[in-house]
Image: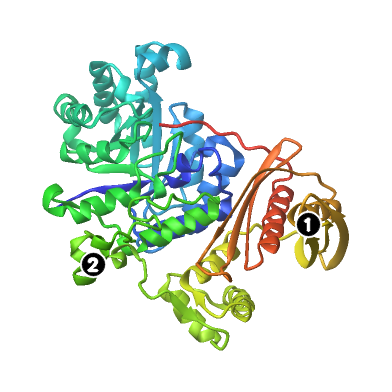
Amino acid sequence: MDRVIIFDTTLRDGEQSPGFSMNTMEKLEMARQLARLNVDAIEAGFPISSDEDFEATREVARQVGTLDGAPIICGLSRVGLGDIDRCWEAVKYAKRPRIHTFVATSDIHLKYKLRKSRAEVLKASVEAVRHARGYCEDVEFSPEDASRSDFDYMCDVLSAVIDAGAGTINIPDTVGYAIPQEWAERIARIRERVHGSDRAVLSVHCHNDLGLAVSNSLTAILSGARQVECTINGIGERAGNASLEELVMALRTRKDFFAVETQVKSQELFRASRLLSHITGVHVQPNKAIVGENAFAHEAGIHQDGVLKEKLTYEIMKPEDIGRASNKLVLGKHSGRHALAARLKDLGFDLAGGDLDRAFRKFKDLADRKKEVYDEDLIAIVTDEATQVPETYELDYLHVLSGTGIVPSATVRLRKEGQTYQESSVGDGPVDAALNAIDAIAGLKGRLQDYAIRAATSGKDAIGEVSVKVDFDGTVVSGKGASTDVIEASARAYLSAVNRLVQRAGSERVKEVGP
């Protein structure tokens, strides 16, 4: 069978959309999961866009791109030679580095954004690819806004960059404008029209503005595309990108129709989705295909009757195919360290030493509060620990007082560099009072822009996962926290944002929209 290359851009296109930003540590954690998922390529960032993005891309190349069987580690750059230099400095540590350079080719972008002629853009494209090939053999080129570009001109650019050394030509539907039938025809015509197309991998990058990103990607595969750029949970600019999990499972489930395969380990899909949701604080809708909470749920009596008799009546996939365990009960308060380590390993977390010690302490604390500890609880514990920023301030004590006819108040004690600091405050409610007390200790004043809470599992004793977005005098940072006590989880999430602000030292991040 033919194989389709899965190019994951969660860490680049995905995280540059509002509300999905990740720091270096979070990108590393997500990149490790993408490596476990066995994607072919990880686009780790846009190194020229900021020092933070450069550092994150470099660390993914160093720590993930050097593993045995590591995926390609790719960085994005515009066609400017300085962009390409910066990109190479970030990805050069990987065993298999790639430079992905792009420029817009539609007349709309040429006239209003670039203010350059077609000839100037063609020349810059060729120079960029040649410059990138001076650093590495694996170079990808994208004509941004390809779905609205003049076809003949775009093909001239593609022919020229292949001659210059591009090994992958990626056709982006940057604004989600394409319709499946016309997109399939466009991809087929590119294969026929572009000189040297047989010497390059043909790729597509589809956006979801009309809800057609996955459909367009699949029709492109039928027309000969052999690389698909996509993201976990379909995150990305505006309405997002093609959803990796939907693409992979469509190709797997309907292998009889598409006659292609991927090397993705589908059993890691659900965990990748949950990890991304935890990192970003943005959760998928319950009816999301493949990874939504209701994706394998049946409520209608006719459906339940059919599934009880034979699952194939209403399920075209098995939950185990994407890594959803049927038995969610894991451990209890009498379980030991070895049992926890073994179960975490089953879930894909191979912890040892200090990492296991910290997870075990949190597990025992949780087990003392809950009768039953579920897989989702363990995932919440481990991912919350792994994605936290270094704790300049650590929560040591929290006491709140609230009720009908009582002014809500909170006392918070924080630990910093071995010293403890305590403050009390009041607020509109117990959460507000706790956050005000944290502000008083840290000498800050944050304005809560967004607050979201969800239960990791069912039941009254479920872990509450809180995600916040806080504006500190114009610097907006996010934070996450988890606890069976939602007020404590809220305080931990806010404290995570405070620690992130301290780590960033007030620096603002600059982003550049790519293909």
> Whole-percent x and y of residue 284?
45, 50
Residue that mark 2 sits on: 305
Specify the amino acid type for callout 2. Asp
Q: Secondary structure at mark 1?
A: helix
Give residue 474's quadrant in the image: top right
Tell us which disc is closer to us: 1 or 2: 2
In this view of the protein, which residue sits in the foreground, 321 or 79?
Answer: 321
> Whole-percent x and y of residue 438?
80, 55
**Residue at 56% of width from left, 44% of height from top?**
21
**Residue 219 in view here:** yes
Residue 499's mark? none
**Residue at 45% of width from left, 81% of height from top?**
342
Count the labels in the image: 2
Q: Image check: 396 left or right of 450?
A: right
Residue that mark 1 sits on: 434
Q: Image check: 188 left or right of 404?
A: left
Image: 297 above or below 202: below
Specify the amino acid type for callout 1. Ala
